[in-house]
Amino acid sequence: MENYELIENEIENQYEFHVGKYLPRIEYIKTNNGEIYLTHTEVPIALEGQGIGSQLAEKVLDDIERKGLRLVPLCPFIAGYIKKHPEWRRIVMRGINIS
């Protein structure tokens, strides 16, 4: 699988990959006190099943950790990703339960 470059589009409040004419993305809301809420993940149907969503999730979580933000995963895809990769619970804001 190709290694895509993560782009943080602060104008649109989303992380994204540019894959040909497609734009897989994770939308977010950042607060002024160091929290980031991941609200929605979208991978175009033409790209589904290729691991692009997982690569996007991994790179976004890595970026959040590098920036020292506290994560609130509102998006079911991200919450599911963290359940499968529990090492990422380390960046989830204390008190947030991922079930």
Image (cartoon, grey):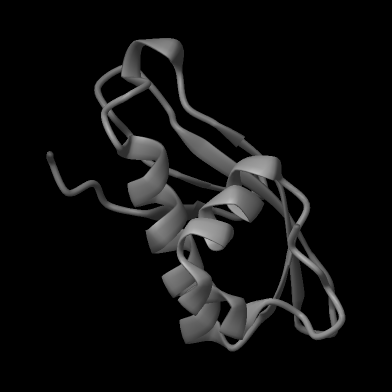
Q: Is residue 18 left or right of residue 88?
A: left
Residue under the point 26% across and 28% down: 50
Measured as percent of width and height from the top left, residue 64 is found at 55, 74
91 shown above or below 3: below
Residue under the point 47% across and 61% down: 60
Measured as percent of width and height from the top left, residue 28 is found at 70, 52
| Quarter of image, res 36 | bottom right
Residue under the point 87% across and 81% down: 95
Q: Residue furthest left?
A: 1
Quadrant including the C terminus:
bottom right
Residue under the point 51% across and 38% down: 25
Q: Is residue 15 left or right of residue 31?
A: left
Give the total of numbered labels: 0
Q: Is residue 93 left or right of residue 64?
A: right
Measured as percent of width and height from the top left, residue 75 is found at 71, 45
4 shown above or below 68: above
| Quarter of image, res 17 | top left
Q: Is residue 85 left or right of residue 5?
A: right
Quadrant including the N terminus:
top left
Q: Nearer the viewer, residue 3 or 13?
A: 3
Measured as percent of width and height from the top left, residue 62 is found at 43, 72
53 shown above or below 87: above
| Quarter of image, res 90 | bottom right
